[in-house]
Amino acid sequence: MNLRNNPLTGGLYFLRGFSLILRPGIRAYVIVPLLVNVFVFAGLIYFGAGQLRSLVDGMLPEWLDWLQWLLLPLFLLAALLVAFLTFNLLANLIAAPFNGLLAEAVERRLTGKEADDGGWQKLLREIRKTLGSELRKLGYIALRAIPLLILMLIPGVNVIASLLWLLFSAWMLAVTYVDYPMGNHGITFPAQRGLLAKRRMMSLGFGASVMAALAVPVVNFLVIPSAVAGATAMWVEEFAPGPDASPPAGA
């Protein structure tokens, strides 16, 4: 029995990512996508606020203007939820080309080994490959998320479906971020899931920690690079084969 295969170990790897992204030689891969994401989020809020007011004004006749005090907060909450989901989707897509380089930089820091091929030139060469990987993950997630969302609409069943959704979300986030360090070593997406399944409790703990941090304002801007860094540390110390071991299946 592996005593490290527990949710706490996974959560600690994610928290460790926050300190790793502050190290010299790693910060450069964090700053650029972070600034872009801040501007994207600010733009979404600015655009959404203007559209929200116009929407509420257009929905009510003049004699019901007094209801705006009730409808505006409700629409604001809905708009913030949509903005949050849209931001996380865009943030992952924007940061995706940088995340592979970030994972390489963190791995070099942890192992002391130089990468065979990396640097900013690799960013330009692998943008298409990285975005393709993101779309593949989105497809994997959508095929499983849609049935769960449908079950959540059924009274009675939705209680169990809600718990399954939380577990799936934690698994999904672990799969999303471990893809960067494992993908750098040529490990296929199905093989990545197989490796995570061998340490399922640790993987779920990592994903659950990411999910909780995403709900914290301001902190959520640092979640993506921290999750990549934490997942890389988890790869190096828990999954990577030793120097005399065979590479993982699918590599």
Image (tube, rainbow, N blue to C red):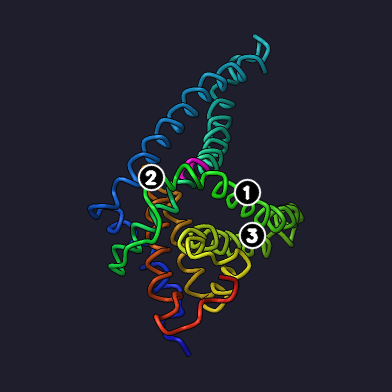
Between 169 and 116, the one nearer to me in the picture: 116
From the image, state whether disc 1 or disc 2 is nearer to you.
2
State the SS at label 1. Answer: helix
Q: Which callout, 1 or 3, points at the residue further toward the start of the chain?
A: 1
Give the CA separation, mark 1 to mark 2: 22 Å
**190 to the left or right of 195:** right
Residue type highlighted by circle 1:
Leu
Rendered residue at 44%/48% (across/down): 122
Give the magenta-colored segment's residue range. Answer: 91-95
Which label's residue is closer to the chain start, 1 or 2? 2
Point out which mark residue 162 bears: 3
Amino acid at circle 3? Ser
Q: CA distance from mark 2 to mark 3?
A: 42 Å
Return the x and y of residue 18 as percentages of the image width and height.
31, 56
**In the image, is residue 143 above or below residue 36?**
below
Q: Main secondary structure of the magenta part?
A: helix
Mark 2 belongs to which amino acid? Answer: Trp
Residue 65 in which image quadrant = top right
On residue 54, the disc is none
Tell me the mark number nearer the camera, choosing from 1 and 3: 1
The residue that label 1 is drawn on is: 135
Mark 2 sits on what residue? Answer: 120
Could you tell me which secondary element the residue under label 2 belongs to?
A: helix
Residue furthest top in the image: 62
Please give the count of numbered marks on the rendered protein. Answer: 3
In front: label 2 or label 3: 2
Please provide percent x and percent y for residue 212.
Answer: 45, 56
Q: Quadrant of the C terminus?
A: bottom right
User: Is residue 94 inside the magenta stretch?
Assistant: yes
Circle 1 residues within 10 Å: few <14, some 14–19, many ≥20: few
Comparing 211 with 189, the one in front is: 189
